[in-house]
Image (tube, rainbow, N blue to C red):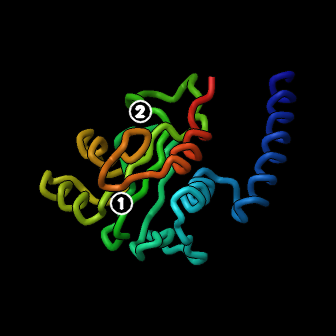
Amino acid sequence: MNDVRWVAGLIRERNRIDAALSACIRRPALSGHIGDWIAAQVFGIELDVHAAKSVDGLFADGRTVNIRWYLKRENLVDLHEDGPDRYLVLTGPKVPAESSLGTARPMVIDAVYLFDAAALKAELRARGLKIGTASSVAGQLWEDAEIYPRHNPAFVLTEEQRELLSLFSHQP
């Protein structure tokens, strides 16, 4: 019974924190909504208030983007056939596919990837892979799309953007 009381107290504390987050981002404090908000702040993305299933917003250059925040990187991305121009993927640590039993999934950003949607889908089709929920993306494609923490000349981040993203990294 002590465990139930402890968990109930932790949930009350989490609800208070979620309420404060929701007040700031103006949406429920779920990782997807928080990730959208973080990406909008860091990358200057104009979020669509009526976000379609496959488009969360626009970059300043007018390209559409779907934002994903995966709390761990498992080399999977939810893709849409009629999707955006880009997929911006924030991830936590890269981990092997294994049971989550006894582990935690902290809300951290260890890396950021920017995929060209058309090129990514073409590559997956060429490999005979499916486009949809949990599409398997090869490790090399992740490496090529990484824009943080590594520097990528295809999408250069400012020092301010790097600093802001570092605020969400693993802290000892």
Q: Quadrant of the C terminus?
A: top right
Name the residue rendered at 46%, 69% in the picture: 59
Which secondary structure lies at badge 2? loop
Which secondary structure lies at badge 1? loop
Kindly indicate the quadrant of the structure image that contains residue 46: bottom right
Badge 1: few (under 14), some or many (20 or more) residues near its Cα, within 10 Å? many
Q: Quadrant of the N terminus?
A: top right
Q: Looking at the picture, which amino acid does disc 1 mark?
A: Leu
Name the residue rendered at 87%, 29% in the picture: 5
Q: What label sits on residue 92 in the rendered view?
A: none
Q: Looking at the picture, which amino acid does disc 2 mark?
A: Lys
Name the mark nearer the viewer: 2 or 1.
2
57 displayed left or right of 87: right
Q: Is residue 39 above or below residue 147?
A: below
Residue extending farthest to the front is 159
Residue extending farthest to the left is 126
- Between 136 and 120, the one nearer to me in the picture: 120
**Could you say where residue 161 lies in the image, as x and y percent from the top left?**
53, 50
**Could you say where residue 64 lies in the image, as x and y percent from the top left?**
41, 72
The residue that mark 2 highlights is 94
Name the residue rendered at 51%, 29% in the picture: 100
Badge 2: few (under 14), some or many (20 or more) residues near its Cα, within 10 Å? few
Q: Is residue 3 above or below residue 149?
A: above
Mark 2 → mark 1, Cα distance in angstroms: 19 Å
Q: Mark 2 or mark 1: name the one nearer the start of the chain.
A: 1
- Between 88 and 32, the one nearer to me in the picture: 88
78 displayed left or right of 52: left
**Could you say where residue 87 lies in the image, as x and y percent from the top left?**
39, 59
The residue that mark 1 highlights is 79
Name the residue rendered at 75%, 53% in the picture: 21
